[in-house]
Structure formats: C-alpha cells, structure tokens
Amino acid sequence: MKKRGKMADSEKILKLKEKARKTSVIESSFATVQTGIGDNYIAPYALALNANNLHISLLSSIPGLLGPLSQNWGSKLIEKYSRKKIALFGVLFQALTWLPIIILAYLFYKGIWTSMLPLLLIIFFSAYTIFGNLAGPAVFSWLGDIVSENQRGKYFSFRNRVTGFFSLVCTLIAAFLLDFFKQHSFLLLGFVIFFAVAMISRLISRELFKKIYEPKLKLEDGYYFSFWQFIKRAPKNNFGKFSIYVAMLHFAAAIAGPFFAVYMLKDLQFSYVIYIIVTITQTASGLLFMPLLGKFSDKYGNYRLIKLSSIFVSIFPIFWLFSSSPLYLIFVPQLIVGIAWAGFNLAVGNFIYDAVTPQRRGIAVSYYNVLIGAGVFIGATLGGLVAKYATINFMNIFLFLFLISGIARAIVSIIMLPRIKEVREVKKFDGHKALKHLVLKTMRLPLQIVGPNFELLVNKKFRYIKK
C-alpha cells in the first residue's frame, strides 16, 4: 500500500510539473510582451527625451549593475520565503514601475524639468530592473526543479522560440505604430501606449505565476556561501572560471552594446521601422535556429555550443564597419549574431543548471549575475565616456567602439575558454559530421514551414537522387 501511495504521489508530481512547464511558456510569453514593446524601446524613448550619449550608456550601465546586485538580496530571501512569493512580489513592483516612466512623457510635453528627465528615466528604469532581478534567482531555481536534466535543451529551446516569436511580433508592430505617431507629431503618446500595455502584460504574467506548481525546496545545512567566498574560489573551480569568462565577455560587449540604437537612429537616420527590422533580425534568426541549437546542446554539451557561439559573438561588431546599408546589416551581422547569442544564452543557462546543485542554484546564479553586472557597468560606462569625450578623426566614434568591442570579445574568449570544462558526459563532437547534419537540417527548415506533405515529397526525391 505504501509503495502504491508513493507511486501515486510521484505520478501526481510529474503531472503537476508537466502542467507547470506548459503554464510557464504562457507566462513567459506575456512577460516577453513587456520586453518587446517596453524594454526594447527604452533607448529610443530616452533619445526622444533629449538624452545624450552618456545618458544612453548610463541607462545601460547603472541598471546593469544594480539589477544583479538585487539578485544577491533575492537569493537570500529564498531562505525565508517561498520562491513563488518572491517572484510575485518582484513582478508586481516591476510592472508598477512603468507608471513613473510614463509620467516623464507628460512632464516633457509640459516642459517641466526637461533637463532632468533623462536622469529620472535612468533612476526609474534602474528601479524597474532591480525589481525584475529580485525575482530572478527564485524563478531560475524554480524552473530548474520543474524541468529534468535530459529535457532542458529541448524545453528551453522551445520556450525561447515561443517567447522570441511574441517578442518579434510585438516589437515589429510597435515600430510601425511608432513611425505613425512620429509622422503625426504624437511620438511620446506612442511610447505612453506601449509602456501601458507592457505594464498590463506583466501583471497578467504575474497572475499566471500563481498557477505554476512550485516543488518544495529543501535547503541543507552548509548550502550557503558568501559572495567573497565565491570570488576567492572562482579562479580555482570550473563554475567560477565560467562566471569570470561570461562576465568579461559581457564587459567587452557592453562597450558597444548601448550604441547600436544611437548609431542607427542618429547617425544613419533610420526610421523606427527600419531600425526595428534590423534589430529584430537578431531575434528572428535565433528563433529559427533554436530547435537545432537545443538538440546540439543536449547531444554535444553546453561547453561546445558556448565555444562555437563565442566565435561569432566576437566578430559580429566588426561586420558593422563594412557597410551601413539596412539590407547588409540585416543579412550579415544581425543574422549571424542572432544565431550566436541564441546559442550562447541557451548553453550558458543550461551550463549553470548542470554545474550547480539545486540547493545552491539561487545563490550561485545571483553571484554569477553580480559579476556580469559589474562587467556591464564598467564596459558601458567606459563606452559612454569614450563616445562623449574622445575625439576620433579617422572613423565614426560608434564604429570605433564596435571595433574595440569585437577585439576585446575575441581576446576574452581566446584566454578564458580553454580554462573551462564540460560538466556532464556528452557525445564526442565530430565537426565534419555535425556540420553536414546542420546544413541538411537548415535546408529542411523552410520545408517544415511550408508543410509536411511538401517536405515528404522533397525527401522522397532526395532519396531517389541519392540512389
């Protein structure tokens, strides 16, 4: 009887976890609406409020530092409160922070404190980031408990595809609407509408959080370790070296990161539609290749995917130097980096799940993100100071930052990647075979979109030709 009872409980938990995974995909889709029409338009909103280059860099660097620091606090809250309660608290106040951000548009329209508005936007967006990151360790740990190890590559690639699709659609629709509002001299009204919808969508995602099953988390004695213990041990253990590498890569990326939008909107004078199409190509290409990236991660390991992705993450900014044509930017640098960052982010998240025990995931990911935050803060601030004060006569200042960022990314990867090891046992990587498989799979993607019958017909013809 006891065995039957245990089996029944086990089956019940499996069903609850399955339902939780499905609900999490829906929840994250609503959360992504906030990103698509909210976060993605913060830099253009700042420019509309007359922000300068230094303001733009601070809009990236300060939230980039304070957000991860708040994760440290969020990881400690796991000791006292359930992960669901922490997530609900953080998400609620993150959503409500859109209200003061919206009010800035009214103040600009009325001519009140106009010189202070970019600084106020930095403060309010920092608060928005802090509340969102406060829930980060709890949500990360929570998701790790509802997705088993052998499902992670497949599940998170699917989840990222769904959320990426919603982000893509929302961002593109918003761009057309924003151009319409700009043409009719109601640009700030467009931002107000977007941010209001972003707030509502985040509140909906909070309601969905309430329905997701939360497994009990048992914190064993001795699970806790301080941030300084983490720093001290980091150069000596695999996860520490991995964290240092990712932080240094984000530092290098942040030198240029805040200025792609400024370069396109100010220097190249792109419309919002062209700007967004160039921007979302990165999301679209990652979305298209996400299933292959997930399978690659499960089969050959996260380290191998990180290594391959880092090559293209490094060279991507340098491609911006060769042409300013929108078509070139869409089909060369943005297409490449979309696949690269999608693979890198997927592998990095799964690497953490593999490398850290469930009890320590929340605290480990918070410390890991503090290092990344420090890297982003230093990199973006450095880039902002160069953009504002440096005199570069031989090339555009933003292209100079892109070049420096690309070189720095490559140096970081060359130095740090050989020091990191794969955590779990994976299949030996055969580069030639994997490339051949990737090409065939890539060729089949359009066929899968057209339809299964057409794909079956082509496959039959292909087999006939081979014979």
Image: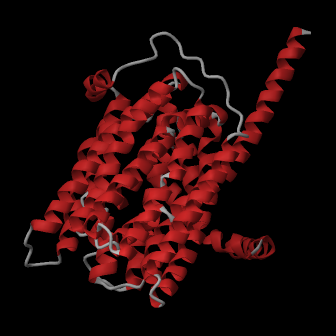
Is residue 426 shown above or below 39? above
Residue positioned 87% across, 9% down in the render: 2
Residue positioned 59% across, 53% down in the render: 202
Extreme residue toward the right, this view? 1
Locate residue 25, reporting x and y percent. 67, 50
Locate residue 108, reporting x and y percent. 36, 72
Q: Nearer the viewer, residue 240 or 181?
A: 181
Residue 406 can be seen in this image: no
Quadrant containing the N terminus is top right
Residue positioned 29% across, 38% down in the render: 244
Q: Is 133 positioned to the left or the right of 409 in the image? A: right
Is residue 434 shown above or below 89? below
Q: Nearer the viewer, residue 146 or 124?
A: 124
Residue 264 can be seen in this image: yes
Quadrant containing the C terminus is bottom right
Q: Nearer the viewer, residue 36 or 99?
A: 99
Residue positioned 60% across, 41% down in the render: 152
Residue 120 falls in image quadrant: bottom left
